[in-house]
Amino acid sequence: MSHPDPLTGDWRLQAWISEGDDGSSVLPLGESPLGILVYSPDGTMITTIAPAGRPRLASTDPLHGGSDDERLRAAETFVAYSGTYDYDGTDVTHTVEMSLYPNWVGTLQVRHVRLSDDGATLELSTDPLTLAGRRSVQRLTWVRG
């Protein structure tokens, strides 16, 4: 399947703002989150997101190293999922095939799209959802890589 759409390519995360139902805003991963989002022409998507400066684990074993607390903190500060996508001109729907958060596997993650006129900046937002115990809309701003 070919995707001749303006989303195709790679994007770097510029900001993630969580806007609460109460009008408050927080930055879930701090002021300088890191993230990569890729939409390929064949309809594949992948994203990884983390705060800047995540602490390293004491071990060099990527599968079994580190204390339980270190591994928990590493998982709590990382978002990763991949699958396929479909863009209808207004929303992009991610069909999740793999995810660090296993509850998303097999789900559709819909993001509302706002693209700058020059196509260099992309805002993806969610419908209200619960994140870190508060109901909020997530707004992620991406710039072309």
Image: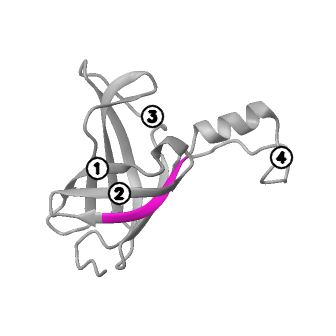
Q: Is residue 83 magenta?
A: yes
Q: Between residue 115 and residue 84, name the one nearer to us.
A: 84
Find numbered disc 2 in the image and state the secondary structure of the residue it sits on: strand
Specify the label residue 110 is tagged with.
1
Position of the C terminus by quadrant: bottom left
Q: Earlier in the sequence, mark 1 or mark 3?
A: 3
Q: Which residue is mark 2?
A: 94
User: Residue sitting at 26 percent across and 58 percent down?
Assistant: 92
User: Residue sitting at 83 percent across and 46 percent down?
Assistant: 65
- Tell me the amino acid under the disc marked 1: Val
Q: Earlier in the sequence, mark 4 or mark 2?
A: 4
Find numbered disc 3 in the image and state the secondary structure of the residue it sits on: loop
- Tell me the amino acid under the disc marked 3: Pro
Residue 4 found in image quarter:
bottom left
Mark-to-mark CA distance, 1 and 3: 19 Å
Residue 10 x, y percent position in the rendering? 40, 70
Q: Which residue is mark 3?
A: 28
Mark-to-mark CA distance, 4 and 3: 26 Å
